[in-house]
Image (tube, helix red, strand yellow):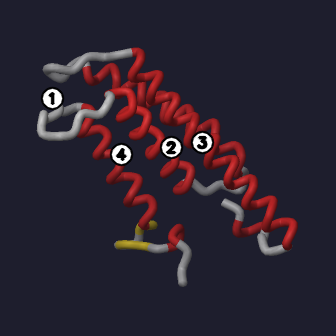
Amino acid sequence: MQPVTKLRLLGFRLAVIALAAYWIAIFVGTHLPKIPKTLPAVNDKVMHFTAFFGLATLLCYCTTSPRVWRRFPIIVAMCLVYACVDELTQSFVRGRHSDVMDFLADAAGTLTAVILYATVRWAWLGRHERSGTVHSTSAT
């Protein structure tokens, strides 16, 4: 069975397609004039945290680099810049406004995801390196 990171659809890695679709969904969701009342009531900050947790997790999963540990600060910076731009552009949508607390929830989701992903990756690599099952070319 092929690993998930290697699956392709129309020549693109499936994980990258999922990331693009997710990012578009976040952008559209945060730029709708008002959330319909038919949806269950969820705290706005929880939605921001969850959205950016998912975005950062997908970015961690999709990116590959021979310098694996250097990509995490870049992912955090990308998410924080996007969160800032997202909050600023919401002020152009009727019924929406920029909120520093939303940005902080975005940042908390991003940092939690990256720290969790890095910790799990470090533990997984350490366990497999001790058993001798990780090859240097497979580390992403």
33 lies above or below 116 = above
Residue denoted by label 3: 114
Residue 56: assigned label:
2
Residue drawn at 55 percent across, 55 percent down: 61
* Secondary structure of residue under mark 2: helix
Q: Is residue 50 left or right of residue 66?
A: left
Residue 123: assigned label:
none
Residue 33, percent from left and from top: 15, 28
Q: Amino acid at mark 2?
A: Ala
* Alpha carbons under labels 1 and 2: distance apart: 25 Å
Residue drawn at 55 percent across, 74 percent down: 3
* Secondary structure of residue under mark 4: helix
* Alpha carbons under labels 2 and 4: distance apart: 10 Å
Residue denoted by label 4: 23
Residue 130, percent from left and from top: 87, 66
65 lies above or below 114 = below
Residue denoted by label 1: 34
Q: Which image quarter: residue 50?
A: top left
Compare marks 3 and 4 and give the one earlier in the sequence.
4
Q: Amino acid at mark 3?
A: Val
Judge depth for marks 1 and 4 and give the one in front. Answer: 1
Quarter of the image containing the N terminus? Answer: bottom right
Compare marks 3 and 2 and give the one earlier in the sequence.
2
User: Label 1 crowding class (10 Å Cα cut-off): few <14, some 14-19, many 20+?
Assistant: few
* Alpha carbons under labels 3 and 2: distance apart: 6 Å
Q: Is residue 110 left or right of residue 39?
A: right
Compare marks 1 and 3 and give the one earlier in the sequence.
1
Q: Do the numbered discs 3 and 2 sit on residues whose CB atoms are within 8 Å?
A: yes
